[in-house]
Amino acid sequence: MLSPIPVRLAETPMASIPALPARYFTYGTPKCYTLREHEATHQFHRDLPPTLMWTYNGTFPGPIIAHRLGTPAAFRRINDLNPNYRGFGIVETVLHNHGGWQSPDDDGWPMDFIHPGEERMYLIPNQVPDNDRSHWASTVWYHDHVADHTAGNVYHGLAGMVNQFDDVDSDNENDTNTLALRLPSGAFDIPLVLGDYILNRDGSLYFDQMEDAGQVGNLFCVNGKVQPFLNVARRKYRFRILCAAQARHFRLKLSNGGSFHVIASDGGLFEAPVEVKNLYIVPGERYEIIVDFSRFPLGTQVALINDVDQKDGNKPANIGRVAIPMMLFVVNRDAPDPSRLPAKLQTITPPDLSKVVATRTIKFHRSKGAWMINDRFWNPDVPLFRCRLGTAERWIVTNGSGGWDHPFHVHVENYQVLKRNGRAPSVVERGRKDIVNLAGGDTVELFIQFHRYAGRYTVHCHNTGHEDLAMMGWVDVQP
Ligand SMILES: [Cu+2]
């Protein structure tokens, strides 16, 4: 059963955390939160032995962080992992707010690790560039990002969801504010964190960190449960889907062939809901969907199916020839539904190409038997290139190889897809993004703007197996 659904992280009284430096009050008085990394047991399935994992605050996935636009947040992160641990991953950890807009100093630079017994603070401003709300309401996530060991550490359990709300996407389906979208909220706004795992006979995690393609698992999980079920009412639900797998892709559809609406991707709401019968998602990506179960009679059972067959971390073997159940929805009751699915969600500011000052090529490839970007391995001392704050650029990202897929991720700023293989992006790639998949031979053209934060912007493949084996670099954004 899909239970317990992750709970929201409660505030920590400011009086009980170390005194905050002045910069934490730049955007107003922050709300304070605590994330403590420590070992805890987790049950993937009632018939499996418990698994010792690394958690934020004792749960896997970690608690949901709910942000409100305009209300800054201060995080106290404590590393209480076992200093004597031996095995895959590493107990020196980094926290990355994936998809968030924060200074590179608070973003989780892969070398800014802390040891067990140490702690540090982060400021998440919860602001948007140029008062442009189209950057905001979305699902981001937080996860470990330490150099060389991100795959093992995230697989250990260090990942959780972040919901970003404002007065429009207001977390209240009964909102009387005329601006409010009134999307399904509360118990009807549910994260679906997709992952795949392998357990040893004793319940411990199996992980091969020398597998340079990235590991694919044989246990299909949603929110840390193997193929769970969820009782649903005959009404609309909002599902926030995150692919937290290391290397596995998913194409999701309903087992009865029913359609659903996609309303948001990584960086925010779409302009209008998009009705689809399937949805493709790769590691690091998020999509939000609305499923209306009122169309189905009481007693209906409908599975969420993945039809991507993947035998190794490199790329899907085929699509559409398998039907792997990820979870089962059981329509078991009626319920009132004050929520709405508006025909228009928001206006997305189009890319301002007049701001473009440079066009760059970012080449993902394999060379010397290893993963490279622009003929380089990860090097924290040398940037891939330098950019200028306040400008925009056109990035042409290529994957020359036929053998591997690479989901491309940029930190700090999200981007917009201008073209994929010379054509307009598909309707679900037109929103704001921070991950795009590059299949073999793909060329994706992106528009990215550097609004406020100078510093190091990490860029990498989000197949974390590739990332750890040096398919990572950084861009130096200079004031
Ligand atoms: Cu890759």
Image (cartoon, helix red, strand yellow):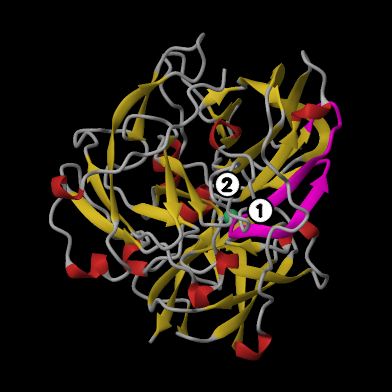
Between 66 and 111, the residue placed more toward the observer is 66
**Is ligand 1 less than 8 Å from the beta carbon at label 1?**
no
Outermost residue, right direction? 257
Q: Is residue 257 magenta?
A: yes
Which residue does the numbered mark 1 point to in the structure image? 264
Total marks placed:
2
* Residue 141 screen position, x and y as percent: 48, 49
| Point 17% across, 65% down: residue | 21
Q: Main secondary structure of the magenta part?
A: strand
* Front tag of 1 and 2: 2
Q: Is residue 155 magenta?
A: no
Instruction: Report the side of 3 relative to 397 (left or right).
Output: left
Image-quarter location of ligand 1 = bottom right
Q: Quick check: can you spot residue 390?
A: yes
| Point 53% across, 30% down: residue | 223
Range drawn in magenta: 254-278
The three-letter code of the residue at mark 2 reads Asp
The three-letter code of the residue at mark 1 reads Ala
When the figure is inspected, residue 172 is found, relative to residue 383, above or below; the finding is above
| Point 62% across, 71% down: residue | 363
Separation of marks 1 and 2 at Cα, in angstroms: 20 Å
Q: Quick check: can you spot residue 312?
A: no
Which residue does the numbered mark 2 point to in the structure image? 175
When the figure is inspected, residue 249 is found, relative to residue 407, above or below; the finding is above
Image quadrant assignment for residue 2: top right
Q: Residues within 10 Å of mark 1 (few under 14, many from 20)?
A: many
